[in-house]
Image (cartoon, rainbow, N blue to C red):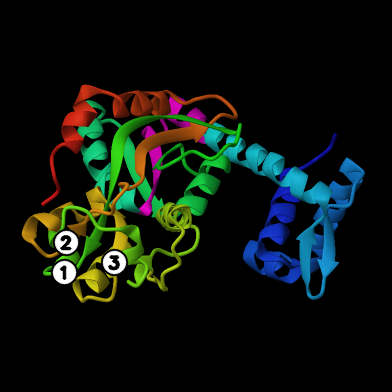
Amino acid sequence: MAVTLTQLISFLTVVRRGSVKAAAEELVVTQPSVSAAVSALERELGVALTERTGRTLRPTPAGAAFVPYAADVLGLLEQGARTAREAAEQDSRTLRISAVTTAGEYLVPQLIQAFRERHPELQISLDVGNREVVFQGVLDHVVDVAVTGRIPDDKRLTGHDFADNQFVLVTAPGDPLARRRWVAVEELAGRPWLLREAGSGTRTLVEDFLASRGISPRLLTLGSNGAIKQAVRAGLGVALQSQAAVELELEMGLLETISPRGGLPERRWHVVRSAVGPVREEVEAFMAFCRSPAAKHALAKPLR
């Protein structure tokens, strides 16, 4: 099979951008060259990979099935080239970490600091995004390892849990409900609930929690943990947040907690990598470190 990298790159870019024109602009090539590359790939595979819907191109069922394989090929080749350069000592060794927003802001920095003390030779980078972005980065081999909440049911991903991720329901200081030992869930139905953006794991957790309790409060979407905390302080509503994200505000009295009858969801933090392709030594070392007493000690130190 004479499939080329140019064909794979052109196909994936068309799928992501939705048109040959946009793909050509991103790749800085002509539109005919992109069309020719995709057409050549379709001839090699013997199936149509894209179809037009209005003004946009979208993958056919065959194209959608082929996308993860094409992404794997490109991602593994880039990863292999990086590993080869490091082995030849042309480049220093690297570890690319990704994390969901809450973990990236309040958990992973401590892990990186403690891990670097044991591996000072590594150049470590951290990308932070919502759940969908993080997992796609792992699947595309854009990052080596990720720290996240629950791992999707996807055989292309593998990982393990390493720390508790406790949740609290926060409210403004002085809220009468914060003084009570327990609060009936029905009393919270009249309060606005502040949520993260679509694609956030925390948002999904909140939506599942509300549905399980049979309440449908008014929802207000905000774009970050910081914005939610400020909105809660201002009295705009309540929010279900990872304790790691609000620990300092609770300690300083800037926020208080409400204890719903029946308790709150319990979760664990996970470290995850791609299950496809060779596993780099640095990835194995970081995943093992996350379960170590040293990591537990690092996470026990609150950020100030």
Left of 56 or right of it: where is 247? left
Quadrant location, the N terminus: top right
Looking at the rendered structure, the kind of residue marked 1 is Asp
Q: Secondary structure at mark 2?
A: helix
**Residue linked to disc 1:** 175
| Gap in angstroms between the C-alphas marked 3 and 2 | 11 Å
The residue mark sitting in front, 1 or 3, is: 1
Q: Is residue 135 visible?
A: yes
For residue 48, the mark is none
> In the rendered structure, which amino acid carries the disc numbered 3?
Val
Q: Amino acid at mark 2?
A: Ala
Return the disc, 1 or 3, that comes first in the chain's sequence. 1
The secondary structure type at the circle numbered 3 is loop
Q: Residues within 10 Å of mark 3 (few under 14, many from 20)?
A: many
In the displayed structure, would residue 217 be above or below residue 268? below
Name which quarter of the figure residue 148 lies in: top left
Sequence-wise, the earlier of marks 3 and 2 is 2
The residue to which callout 3 is attached is 238
Magenta stretch: give its range: 82-101
User: Contact, CB < 8 Å: mark 2 with mark 1?
Assistant: yes
Choose top left, top right, bottom left or bottom right for residue 192: bottom left
Q: Would residue 229 be counted in the magenta stretch?
A: no
Of 13 and 273, the residue lying toward us: 273
Q: Which residue is mark 2?
A: 178
Closer to the camera in the image, 149 or 99 = 149
